Amino acid sequence: MAILPILQFPDPRLKEKSVPVTGVTAEVSAVIDDLLETMRASPGCVGIASPQVGIASRIIVVDVSTHRRGGQEENHGLLVLVNPEILARGGKQLVREGCMSVPDYTANVQRAQWVLVDALDREGKQTILEAIGFEAVAIQHEVDHLDGYLFLDRVSSIKTDLFRRKRYR
Amino acid sequence: MGHFSVSVMGKDRPGIVAEVSRILYELGCNIEDSTCTILSGQFAMILVVFHEKPMTTAEMNPSFDDVRQKMGLQVTIHSLKADEVVHDKSFIGRPHIISVYGADRPGIVYSVARELARRKVNITDLNTQVVGSKERPVYVMVLEVDLPEGIDMKELDVVFDGIKKELGVSISVRPIETLEL
């Protein structure tokens, strides 16, 4: 296991579409372990997608249970989703998102309130799950990474929705 | 070699950014960070620029004389020491939004800012506006702040309650719930 460096925009690899994996092989399992370790090593981070560490496979990891607000909503705790596909979306919510690959900004992004997701779990078993609230946002954000989209692609107004991070260590 | 802060202010008109960026480009400066805004028709811009070669503010200043005269701009340049330029942005902290509004009267900003400063609260953004009709102007202030760990929120609430009564304003403090992904 290893903590991998996070690619930052404008790295062109973040804009590429990732390809599905054939199953949860030993190699995929190793990627999952690295993603988990990398996510946990980043303060406050509740999700990561494989393209963010330069691996163009469709693998995401989400855990909003540690988030102040996300943890109070219904959530699945740690979610490993391989080849995730959002089958259905419902409702709307506006949430302030930050992204390790776009470290200088945060943005208000409109996302679905509820999603229905089809994916392989960590053991490679096909699973369908529902997510709401912050967990649903995290899944949509990470699935976007697999398709080469960043939250910057989802912002409707730079003037009112994009915020420069001002806080320094 | 080094960083400089450049601030530009003057009556807004098309071409200010073009002229300022041309001069910086011709001086060989790289714009690393910048922001601008327009307040009541006054354009204001602040930039942090980097120059690879040794350069002093005295050498840079004359290049801006033309825009100072022709465009009526005030341009100020400061040399920054290496340790004054911070690149590392943090994901930690407790960012909050404080919104304040009420009938326009002097002292609203000061009353709130004074109490924040006493508690070592860093203001990272401040916007104030007067909205509403001429007869009934409403003053709106929105602050983005970093609340230090261990701040006594109950005590701050009591203090803000005092300001609310004294100035007849509404004050609310809400956490900015950013989802870090």
Image (cartoon, rainbow, N blue to C red):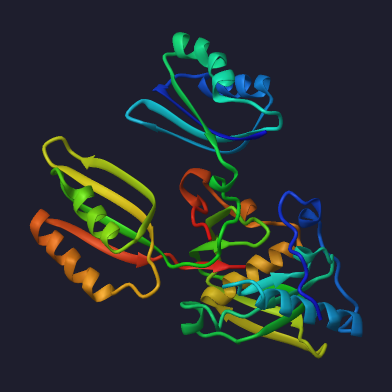
Tell me which residue sits at (19%, 64%) in the image: B160
Residue at 52% in and 46% down = A157
Give the image quarter of residue A77: bottom right
**In the rendered image, is residue A89 in sight?**
no
Q: Nearest the camera: B133 or A107?
A: A107
Please state if A127 lies on the left or on the right of A108 as rendered.
right
From what the image shows, is residue B25 above or below residue B52? above
In the displayed structure, B61 sits above or below A75; it is above
Apparent side of residue B161 relative to residue A64 in the rendered image (left or right): left
x and y percentages locating residue B65 in the rendered image:
50, 12
- Could you tell me residue A50's position as x and y percent? 78, 69
The residue located at (76%, 65%) in the rendering is A5
For the N terminus of chain B, which image quadrant? top right
- Which is more toward the observer, A29 or B143? B143
Q: Is residue B178 above or below residue A156?
A: below
Which x, y percent locates residue A153? Answer: 64, 52
With respect to residue B98, does B35 lie above or below? Answer: above
Quadrant location of the C terminus of chain B? bottom right
The foreground one among A46 and A153 is: A46
With B4 as the anchor, is B174 left or right in this view? Answer: left
Specify the quadrant of the image occupied by residue B74. top left
Tell me residue B73's x, y (percent): 43, 18
